[in-house]
Amino acid sequence: MNRRHYDVVIVGAGPAGLSAARAAAQKQAHARIAVLDDNPRTGGQVWRHGPAYPPAPALNERLDALLRAGNVDVFSSARVVAPLDDRSLLVESAQHGLLELGCERLILATGARERLLPFKGWTLPGVTGAGGLQALIKGGVPVRGERIVIAGSGPLLIASLATARQAGANVLAVIEQAPWTAVARFGVGLFATPSKLWQAARLTHGFAGLRYLTGSVVREAIGDGRVEQVRIRQGRDGHLVLDCARIACGYGLVPNVTVGESLGCAVHRDPAAGSALIVDDAQRTSLAHVFAAGECTGVGGMELASVEGEIAGLQAVDAQREAARLQTQRDRWRRFARRVETAFAPREAARALPSDDTLFCRCEDVTCAQVREHTNWRDAKLQTRCGMGPCQGRICGCAAELYFGWNTAQVRPPFSPARIGTLLEAVRDTTPDAK
Ligand SMILES: Cc1cc2nc3c(=O)[nH]c(=O)nc-3n(C[C@H](O)[C@H](O)[C@H](O)COP(=O)(O)OP(=O)(O)OC[C@H]3O[C@@H](n4cnc5c(N)ncnc54)[C@H](O)[C@@H]3O)c2cc1C
């Protein structure tokens, strides 16, 4: 196995990870730094780019800074599969094969993932997450002229709307589960962050040419072999059916804490907001040499992720004074994050378990009726195989946390399907007798 040692290793090359790398590299020219990300391109979620989507200027700015600094190795298509101990990670890299990355300090910037909640027909081709649709479009999937309904909750619906419209889709409606009073209050609160107000106006165009329905949820995707219609519950008793070719439905984001949790970092559990890594003012986790930044510490958007990353990067190279200067900025974006969380917290209709025959775990074909018979996640897994398919509960585990309040943490490596050879190497490296 290929072994490398760094002063600072950063997992995740989104706004938090790249900002951390830039801050650390610029502050400490002698520090050897590595950033790795499982995506083939750097940028994380918000700066995702593809064939017809050039990299965002903010991404280029950070990558140029890393290149100029000359002390940062960037590993793309490199996934942390398991920790080997608290200072080294087992990594599968498309370019370098199997890697053991050792470090003095570790920064976790593993971001968040979309929360998908089941509804009747959600496994039909044409149903994706709201962020999922964005990723498909940026990856080159054509949607020009397609009738699309975007649904779920939170600002990601707006980002998805803008991407779909830019790609020529005919977005019929945006269906938001939060009530209009909460959305209106949030809108007024945007005056406290004018850049966000301007961004919202630019992305929505005032919702011209489509329906923006609040207090409403998708109840069913209907179609023969592919989505043809969507049934929406509007307010308390209203129903609406729209003809469409795609439904992009996501109920906000939940932090991606798997790597941190498996290392032993303390986690704050919250079924509504998702579990998040606990950090102090220095972005330090409960382990002294491990820092965390961005959405793995709580969902808060790109600006918060960037400033947290910067603080973590500076702290990791012992530049405490410079890091402390960024706290006011971080507090400001944390207040914004709290307003988002309050406005778009899942309400009763979104938290209601769908009908018994709806598939809950789509990897293992387990229905809602089968899951709700159990009292905890472990029981449900053992008795039904729920959460034991290829996604390892990343999707149905989120739903189970929200509906039943279960702890669905997945801390046993490998975190994702890994090559047999990788696991054998890991055993050989950590078990002297196996050599
Ligand atoms: C699908 C999706 C689409 C989004 N689109 C937008 C948008 O258009 N506009 C917007 O303002 N916000 C968007 N967001 C919100 C966005 O997540 C944040 O605002 C911002 O990207 C957070 O930055 P971050 O650095 O914390 O995390 P991210 O940008 O999510 O970066 C984390 C990175 O860590 C990597 N990673 C995680 N685990 C591992 C591992 N084990 N090994 C290697 N790499 C790993 C991930 O692949 C990811 O690239 C989106 C979120 C999601 C989930």
Image (cartoon, grey):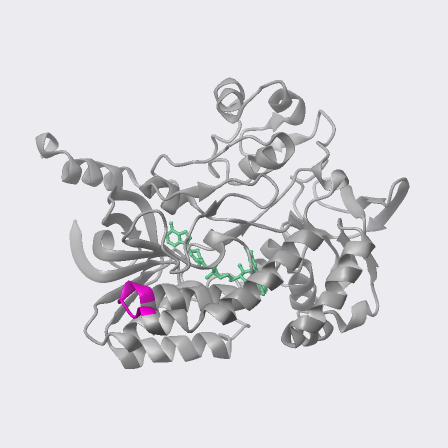
Residue lying at the far right of the rendered structure:
238
Q: Is residue 153 something that shows in the picture?
A: no
Residue 397 position, x and y percent, is 54, 35
Q: Is residue 316 magenta?
A: yes
Query: Would residue 235 appear left or right of 9 to someone viewing this image?
Result: right
| Residue at 71% in and 54% down | 343
* Residue in front for this viewpoint, 420 or 20: 20
x and y percentages locating residue 257 in the rendered image: 44, 46
Q: Is residue 323 left or right of residue 175?
A: left
Q: In this picture, is 259 found above or below 337?
A: above
Count numbered badges in the picture: 0
For residue 351, above or below residue 195: above
Is residue 348 rendered magenta in the image?
Answer: no
Q: Going 77% across and 55% down the picture, which residue do you hit?
A: 182
Residue bounds of the magenta highlight: 315-320
User: Measuring 43% from the left and 48% from the top, which residue is drawn there?
Assistant: 278
At 71% from the left and 73% from the top, the residue drawn is 191
Say above or below: 205 vs 359. Answer: below
Residue 185 location, quadrant: bottom right
Q: Nearer the viewer, residue 32 or 93?
A: 32
Q: Is residue 168 left or right of residue 434?
A: right
Quadrant location of residue 167?
bottom right
Foreground pick, 285 / 225: 285
Nearer-the-camera pick, 420 or 382? 382
Quarter of the image with the C terminus is top left
Q: Position of residue 172 (x, y in %)?
A: 80, 59
Judge whether residue 69 can be spotted in this image: yes
